[in-house]
Amino acid sequence: MADPESLRQITRSPAPLSTWFGVVLLFTLFGVIVLAVIGPLPRGSDYEQTRAKKRMENLKTSREDAEKALNTYAWVDKNKGVVRIPISRAMEVTIAQLAQRKPMQAGPIATPAPETQATAVSTSPAPAGSPRPTAAQPSPQASAPATQGAAVSSPPPSGAVSPSPAAVQSPPAPASAAPAKTP
């Protein structure tokens, strides 16, 4: 065997230039082999193409099912007598039903009382024996008969916040309007 002194000199001496050149050449050869194997492979993925085809087929079948459901007659529940009709026929039936109904005159729109009114009313002492007003009880404006005009309303109490001008303005009632019938 070699003496320990010669081994120390070999391990401490810088590697010769040919060793470094061999390592670089080995890595270059490995890179060329990888490019030769991977290079000619197609860049597109068959997996993505098959998924896209499946999505298109699912979309097509769902649209066909929806088209069939919208344009055919079918039983929904035969025991209860519920059927599905084509949407075009359903629109015709709905229009005929709405044409037979007479529109009813709308009543006045009551605006909710501001918070300051509600607290002022609920903090005032009530006579013994009379119920205290609560938020669940209807306001005088909401309980007004439907035959009153939209302009009739009670003035707000002093110190209350006045409603916005858009809420105060209302169109005038027609002169020939008949009172609304209550059911």
Image (cartoon, rainbow, N blue to C red):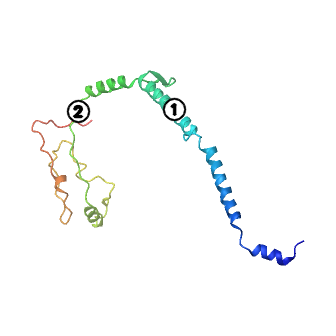
Residue position marked by numbered label 2 in the rendering: 103
**82 left or right of 136 in image:** right
The residue at the far left in this view is 175
The residue at the far top in this view is 73
Q: Picture quarter containing residue 101? A: top left
The one of 29 and 153 positioned closer to us in this rendering: 29
The one of 133 and 99 positioned closer to us in this rendering: 99
The one of 33 and 73 positioned closer to us in this rendering: 33
Q: Position of residue 40 (x, y in %)?
A: 59, 41
- Crowding around mark 1 (Cα neighbors within 10 Å: few <14, some 14 to 19, many 20+) is few
The residue at the far bottom in this view is 5
Q: Position of residue 10 (x, y in %)?
A: 78, 73
Q: Position of residue 75 (x, y in %)?
A: 48, 23
Figure check: 51 above or below 139: above
For the point 15% across and 51% down, the residue is 169
For the point 9% across and 38% down, the residue is 175
For the point 57% across and 39% down, the residue is 42
Q: Secondary structure at mark 2?
A: loop
Figure check: 100 above or below 144: above
Query: Which one is earlier in the sequence, the residue at label 2 or at label 1?
Result: 1
Amino acid carrying label 2: it is Pro
Residue position marked by numbered label 1 in the rendering: 58
Q: Work out which quarter of the rendered image holds the N terminus and state it.
A: bottom right
- Crowding around mark 2 (Cα neighbors within 10 Å: few <14, some 14 to 19, many 20+) is few
Distance of mark 2 from mark 1, alpha carbons? 46 Å
Amino acid carrying label 1: it is Asn
